């Protein structure tokens, strides 16, 4: 009815504990009308560029008052995260959770694609799988850090924290990734309130 995946609603329920339905004898969730309106509010907030966490904070702050979606800020755009991962399924998984938190995401599956996207789009952060393109992830980390102050998160099924840090990575995460750990790493590196940045219109 709301166009929100069931898995997403359950993740919000577990993570934020604000919209928690009752369960009937069969274990099915039963949402009250006001809870449906609360979910609509969160959905509208995210559509307007607010992160999931901040949308729930707004919901908590506005509890008891009339719920309405926050106004869209003129000339703003979401921060872009570049995913460089050889595994399309892992990349899709990471992309889903990053988008849930309000980030734009560009997925690349080879080192060459990652470099091209990086040079064309100037992402705020890059998540690099160290085994991409036959294992050139470390050199990719070095490349990104040499270009400027972009934050780099290295991920791998291998314990390679020391090598990743030496190559310039700002953080290292061991696979399989915990979605909350990934989101926390990204937001910690970018700043908890850095989910929006001025667009070209605002700059003028």
Image (cartoon, grey):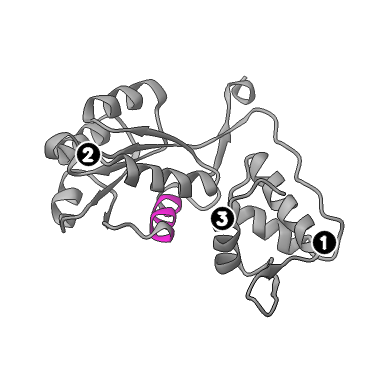
Mark 2 Cα shell of 10 Å, populated few (<14), some (14-19), many (≥20): many
Query: In x, y percent, where is residue 120?
Result: 38, 20
Q: Residue drawn 27% across and 41% down?
A: 87
In the rendered image, which quarter is residue 136 located in? top left
Q: Nearer the viewer, residue 149 or 92?
A: 92
Please give the residue where the numbered disc 2 appears in the rendered image.
Answer: 141
Q: Main secondary structure of the magenta part?
A: helix
Q: Is residue 127 above or below residue 36?
A: above
Whichever of labels 2 and 3 marks the residue nearer the N terminus, that label is: 3
Q: Is residue 171 magenta?
A: no
Please give the residue where the numbered disc 3 appears in the rendered image.
Answer: 8
Element type where label 3 sits in the image: helix
User: Furthest-bottom residue in view?
Assistant: 25
**Which mark's residue is nearer the viewer, 2 or 3?**
3
Please give the residue where the numbered disc 1 appears in the rendered image.
Answer: 33
Q: Is residue 190 above or below residue 57?
A: above
């Amino acid at each position: 009815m709301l166009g929100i995946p069931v898995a997403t609603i359950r993740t919000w329920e577990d993570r934020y504990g604000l919209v928690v339905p009752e369960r009937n004898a069969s274990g099915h969730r039963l949402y009250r009308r006001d809870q449906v309106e609360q979910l609509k509010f969160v959905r509208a907030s995210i559509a307007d560029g607010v992160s999931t966490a901040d949308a729930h904070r707004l919901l908590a702050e506005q509890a008891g008052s009339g719920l309405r979606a926050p106004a869209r800020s003129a000339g703003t755009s979401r921060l872009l995260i570049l995913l460089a991962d050889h595994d399309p399924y892992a990349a899709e998984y990471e992309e889903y959770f990053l988008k849930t938190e309000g980030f734009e995401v560009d997925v690349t599956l080879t080192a060459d694609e990652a470099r091209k996207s990086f040079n064309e789009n100037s992402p705020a952060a890059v998540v690099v799988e160290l085994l991409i393109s036959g294992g050139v992830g470390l050199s990719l980390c070095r490349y990104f850090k040499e270009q400027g102050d972009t934050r780099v998160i290295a991920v791998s099924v291998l314990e390679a924290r020391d090598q990743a840090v030496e190559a310039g990575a700002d953080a290292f995460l061991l696979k399989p990734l915990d979605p909350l750990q990934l989101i926390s790493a990204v937001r910690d590196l970018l700043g908890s309130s850095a989910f929006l940045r001025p667009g070209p219109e605002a700059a003028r």
